[in-house]
Amino acid sequence: MGRIKLDLHDIYSNGRAIDSELKRVMEEAVKKKISEIEIIPGKGSGQLKKHVLRFLGQPEIKQLYQRVEKDDKNFGRIFVHFRH
């Protein structure tokens, strides 16, 4: 039961790299039975956050996790919760 943190600041302009990193951490969370992923798209224009939420909304990805939580106090953070 742990947490994975994924900071997307360094690859924010590379859509393919973002998707492959998101896919990688989702698979790692499932394999290692991690309970939560913290994704940090940063504040910026909000486009990266929308990209992440679109990725998480895909049916084949959505079936991997229990729920998504947007941090009320920090716009630039998204939590993905798993139930294993």
Image (tube, rainbow, N blue to C red):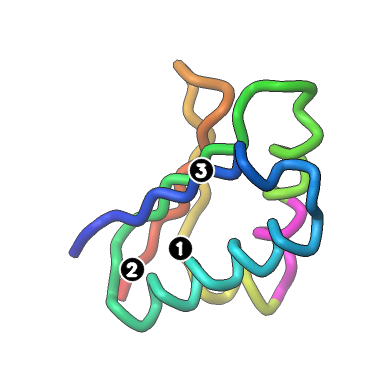
Q: Which residues are magenta?
A: 54-59
The answer to whether 13 appears left or right of 36 in the picture is right
Disc 2 secondary structure class? loop
Image quarter (top left, top right, bottom left or bottom right) of the C terminus:
bottom left
| Identity, as a three-letter code, of the amino acid under mark 3 | Asp
Image quarter (top left, top right, bottom left or bottom right) of the N terminus:
bottom left
Circles 2 and 1: CB distance less than 8 Å? Answer: yes
Which residue in the structure is indicated by mark 3?
7
Which residue in the structure is indicated by mark 2?
83
Q: Position of residue 2 (x, y in %)?
A: 22, 59
Disc nearer the start of the sequence (3/1): 3
Disc nearer the start of the sequence (2/1): 1
The answer to whether 67 appears left or right of 11 in the picture is left
Is-magenta flag for residue 13?
no
| Identity, as a three-letter code, of the amino acid under mark 1 | Gln
The answer to whether 8 appears left or right of 18 in the picture is left
